[in-house]
Amino acid sequence: MLFLAELMVSERPDPASEEERSPQLLLHPAGGCEGTGGNPGSSSCDISPLLKDPAAFRTLIDLLEDHLRASFPKIDFIAGLDSRGFLIGPPLAQRLGIGFVLIRKKGKLPGPTESVSYALEYGKAELEIQSDAVEPGQKVVIVDDLLATGGTMCAACELMKRLKAEVLECLVIIELKLLKGSEKLKSIPFYSLLQYD
């Protein structure tokens, strides 16, 4: 399980002081990420402590915002994966002055949708996006809290491809490197704040 490191931030730190804004100051492994009892082979990292601490959560969004502003001159939308991508994506999109779109589990979105099936480490699932969520050629960053085996993120990229959008990057807080999920993304740029083996 991940716990918050002590982080006392009342104002946004000076951007020049990168050490103060290191993601390792947000979270530290106390027991690390662990398998979940319910689904064999699946992994879980608890971001609840991060969400409970407003200063730490603000610093997380600061770090993600700084990364995206430095990396991409133009982004049209942040797309968040159901469901924890919905916690990170909207505040990040608001900071950047752009819109947010939902990528949801099957059957949760109204209106016409595009859907894709994909394999999980413990079964199968299906993701959907509204057919008019993005227009051809629009530039999108896909966000989630965790990259494990990469199946869900790859499915989200496939949905964007079907809508003819350009995926600039897949962005997560935590990457479980041992599961090699980023390798499945192939040529799609990928960024994680924290990496665990």
Image (cartoon, rainbow, N blue to C red):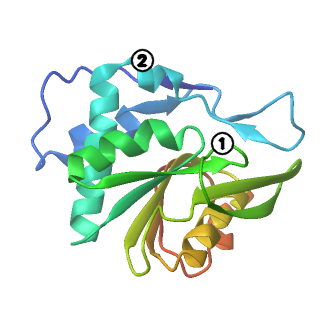
Image vertical order of residue 177 relative to residue 63, above or below: below
* Residue sitting at x 26%, y 45%: 94
Badge 1 is on which residue?
108
**Viewer-nearest residue: 107 or 24:** 107
Direction front: furthest residue: 111
Taking the spot 57% from the left edge, 77% from the top edge, the residue there is 161
Is any atom of residue 173 visible in this view? yes
Q: Residue 28 location in percent, x, y?
A: 48, 31
- Residue at 24 percent of width and 20 percent of height: 8
Q: Secondary structure at mark 2?
A: helix
Query: Mark 1 belongs to which amino acid?
Result: Lys
* Residue on which the image places disc 2: 52
Residue 141's place in the image compared with 148, above or below, is: below
Number of other residues with Cα within 10 Å of mark 2, as a class: few under 14, some 14 to 19, many 20 or more: few
**Residue 196 visible in the displayed image:** no
Quadrant housing the N terminus: top right
N-terminal label among 2 and 1: 2
| Residue 8 circle label | none
SS class, disc 1: loop
Report x, y in % for residue 168: 41, 72
Check disc 2 and give the amino acid type: Lys
In the image, residue 92 lies at what x, y percent? 31, 46
- Alpha carbon of mark 2 to alpha carbon of mark 1: how far? 27 Å
